[in-house]
Image (cartoon, helix red, strand yellow):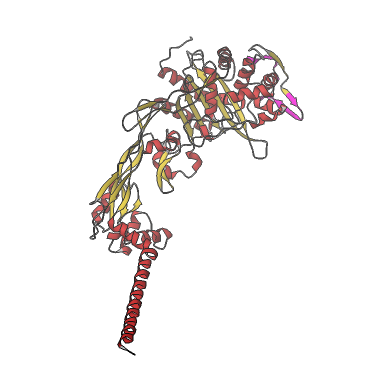
Amino acid sequence: MNNREYFFTESNKRIFFLSAVIFILGFIIITRLFYLQIIKHPYYNTLALYRQGEDRILEAKRGTIEDYNNFPLAVNINNYNLIAIPAEIKDVASTTKIVAGFLGIQDENSKEFNELKSRLSKRIDYYELLKRDIGYDLAKQIKELNLPGITTEEGFKRYYSEGEIFSHLIGFVGTKDDKRQGLYGVEEFFDKQLAGENGLLRSEYAPGKVSILDSAKTIKQAKDGSNLILTIDRSLQYVVCKDLLEGIKDSRAEGGTAIIMNPKNGAVLALCNYPNFDSNQYNKTKNYHDFLDVAASDAFEPGSIFKVITMAAALDANKLEPDTTYEDTGEVKIGNYTIRNSDKKAYGTKTMTNVLEKSLNTGAVFAARLLGYSLFRSYVKDFSFGSLTEIEQPNETTGDISNLEKNSDIYLATASFGQGISVTPIQLATAISAIANKGKLYKPYLLAKIISPEGKEEMTQPYFIRQVITPETAKTLGAMMVSVLENGYGILARVPGYYVAGKTGTAQVPNKSGGYSEETIHSFVGFAPAENPVFVGVVKIINPKIGNFAESTAAPIFGKFAKFALNYYQIPPNRK
């Protein structure tokens, strides 16, 4: 082998060796990079984020809720939240025991205790919200302990000045899906407007674990929520709720609803339901149904108050007059069914005004038959039964008038006196308001105006829906309803010095088997003064144990708050 061949051979070996070394080193580097950048990426990314900083929500200030006269109903008060900085906790075991006591966790073997320990064990976690609204005294006690990694921060708590009497209207602020938000009432319906827009607070951490408060920087400013002014008058609300509760207790009823509405624009002036709850202590309420505004969410068979709607339709369609007569034999036979008057009596020749005064089922059937299926159904729908009123409350229901679609003699007959169909109290208030307002139907509403954080005011404009009946029909029917209080079963709803229009209703409650139970719902609808109404009232009493008919249960409640309302609005008397 000559020198030239030897040189190339040695050279090839060195090149091969160096290439192999470079390849192996490259493979190791690439493998390591793959491990760090791909396999361990989530870990190091999280570690880097916690070491460099953390984004926290900067909670916006929630808007207030006030009554029409600017009395505060829902406001924010300062409070404190219990928070943990797990990265600064030195002894997880002992800290967990202490914090568990603050949270009311007694059992160290419980799921709650183990979850708390797990949260406090996150060594690269710099913020854990453990509990909201802990109160000043507990916050002070926690601070005095100087427990590493456990501290408090200022927050806010929703406070409701009227507690129970506005509970269904307003609802409350609670937690849903780990998010603080309005639940039920206008708190839920207007949650977006009230809540505003949260901001963003970024905290950067140095290697020495600088406190979260030492490095906070606002990335996005919070935008506070808007304030709401309701149509509700606190003075009226108080009286209506008081009178309703007294009436429920006097009749030993299970509950009830009362509404006052301005018939000229649809503004709701007062609305009460019982049972109610305390918005400041909503967590003590066990039955979620008690949170619902049943004036909008619960439908019922209205009974004889619906005769007003039947008579309105028949008068407007020129099928009869107030003095039109029929022969009352006490019953009407339809196929295998027999419909009787509520008192099982026959009254002989009676006018349509007498039908309302004596609340005769047979007379309502007479009027409905003159109308026929199509025309009766059309008027019922025009009064907005069977559809949402769109009042600003969640969980509203449409009621059920589907039986009117069946073109059946028996369903037409029973619907004429409020049986076999269901409606809500707010639908009734809306419909009776149309009668009180010369046949003009307006959408009911609760929001008078909304005020933006910048102070811009946006007034709610009354929404006219349709002319349901003519002004002449409304006037005639109003006079017939006055006669109910003068000569019929509504005497206890009278207000001395005023002509008041109204109608009572006593309805059986249907059961699941298709028949009717022994339970009843008593109701009253009316307006005053009859010739130029300033308010419409609806009263509903659920299953009273004392008093067989609405004339002795629901009517007196209306009479009490009607007297107050007329004096409150300084309406001069129009009769001796």
Q: Nearer the viewer, residue 304 or 20?
A: 20
Q: Is residue 501 among what the camera can see?
A: no
Report the number of discs. 0
Residue 220, by quadrant, is: top left
Q: Nearer the viewer, residue 550 or 318?
A: 318
Most extreme residue toward the top is 576
Range drawn in magenta: 332-353
340 part of magenta stretch: yes
Looking at the picture, how far across and down is residue 382, in whole percent?
59, 23
Please tell me which residue is depicted at 34% across the width and 72% down the height of the picture.
26
Q: Nearer the viewer, residue 42 or 248?
A: 42
Looking at the picture, how far across and down is residue 393, in whole percent?
47, 34
Q: Is residue 560 above or below residue 163?
A: above
Q: Is residue 408 among what the camera can see?
A: yes
Q: Where, quadrant-wise, is the N terminus in this rendering?
A: bottom left
Looking at the picture, how far across and down is residue 534, in whole percent?
46, 18
Decide if residue 410 is on the left or right side of residue 534: right
256 part of magenta stretch: no
